[in-house]
Amino acid sequence: IMLGAVWRRSAGQLVLVAHHLVVDGVSWRVLMGDLTTAWRQVVSGAPVGLPRAGTSFRRWTQLLERAASGADSSYFRRPLPGRDEEIGRRGLSEADRVARERLRTVVVGAGTTAALLGE
């Protein structure tokens, strides 16, 4: 599951599950703040209005580009000393390819679903 959302009606809870490739740890903190703000606004009957993002994506990429060509860039571009170590304990295999990825869907009954949701 890359991203999943379940509304637990009996508990009044929204359960969000996201793979790290979808949302990293830093972004979760931002998202949770926005979700909390929006939820409080909905519960109080107010229209949902979130503050503007502090930095646009365009501006962020410009700042990254500037940092990459700054005075310290030669330090980070230098080769590391020593020999290159292998990644992991085994070499890469032909089986480890996105082209061979498969999706499996399992459908469970209402009883199992209720048990998983704690109902």
Image (cartoon, rainbow, N blue to C red):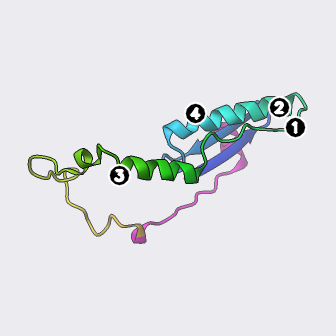
Q: CA distance from mark 3 to mark 2?
A: 43 Å
Where is residue 66? Give x, y as percent. Answer: 42, 50
Q: Pointer 4: what residue?
A: 29
* Disc 1 packing (10 Å; few <14; some 14–19; many ≥20): few
Q: Are marks 1 and 2 in contact (CB under 8 Å)?
A: yes
- Residue type highlighted by circle 3: Ser
Q: Is residue 107 magenta?
A: yes
Q: Nearer the viewer, residue 2 or 77?
A: 77
Q: Pointer 2: what residue?
A: 41
* Disc 3 packing (10 Å; few <14; some 14–19; many ≥20): few
Comes first in the chain, label 3 or label 2: 2
Nearest-to-viewer mark from 3 and 2: 3
Q: Are marks 3 and 1 in contact (CB under 8 Å)?
A: no
Nearest-to-viewer mark from 3 and 1: 3
SS assignment at label 3: loop
- Residue type highlighted by circle 2: Gln
* Disc 2 packing (10 Å; few <14; some 14–19; many ≥20): some
SS assignment at label 4: helix
Q: Is residue 30 above or below residue 93?
A: above
Where is residue 70? Give x, y as percent. Answer: 34, 47
Q: Pointer 1: what residue?
A: 47
Q: Is residue 113 magenta?
A: yes
**Residue located 83% across and 31% down the image:** 41
SS assignment at label 2: helix
Q: CA distance from mark 4 to mark 1?
A: 22 Å
Q: Is residue 40 above or below residue 114?
A: above
